[in-house]
Amino acid sequence: MGDRWHVEVDRSVCIGSAQCLHHAPDGFRLDSARQSHPVEPDTDASERILEAAESCPVEAIAIALLGSGETVFPPEE
């Protein structure tokens, strides 16, 4: 079985660019305020979810390993 991730969107940072929807249309939704949120906060590790996080122009998407909380994205400075 593969890794499981916890995905969060910092809604105070999200600008509603919808890049996450472009890269992972099944992983994210925009609400009525054009704020992104993960469809399933706890999900299987996915290249598309990672691409969505990497494409966010304001780095509003954070991914951590479920269980350990180890950071997957954004990379540690």
Image (tube, rainbow, N blue to C red):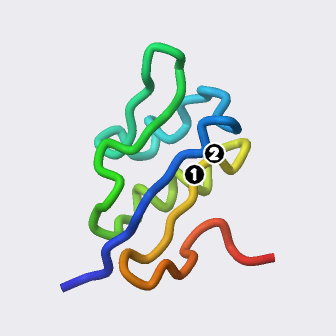
Check residue 56 in the rendering and tell me which mark sits there, or answer none: 2
The amino acid pointed to by label 2 is Cys
Relative image position of residue 35 (x, y in whole percent)? 53, 27
Question: Toward the viewer: 55 or 71?
Answer: 71
Q: Are marks 1 and 2 in contact (CB under 8 Å)?
A: yes
The amino acid pointed to by label 1 is Ile
Q: In the image, is 65 to the left or to the right of 2?
A: right
Residue at 35 percent of width and 53 percent of height = 41
Residue at 44 percent of width and 57 percent of height = 7
Q: Residues within 10 Å of mark 1 (few under 14, many from 20)?
A: many
Which quadrant is the C terminus positioned in? bottom right
Relative image position of residue 58 (x, y in whole percent)? 73, 43
Q: In the image, is 57 to the left or to the right of 64?
A: right
Q: Is residue 36 above or below residue 23?
A: above
Residue at 35 percent of width and 38 percent of height = 25
Residue farthest toward the left in the current orientation of the protein: 1
Relative image position of residue 65 (x, y in whole percent)? 43, 77
Q: Is residue 48 above or below residue 24?
A: below
User: Helix, strand or loop at disc 2?
Assistant: loop
User: Helix, strand or loop at disc 1?
Assistant: strand
Q: In the image, is 10 to the left or to the right of 57?
A: left
Quarter of the image where one finds residue 11: top right
Mark 1 highlights which residue?
Answer: 61
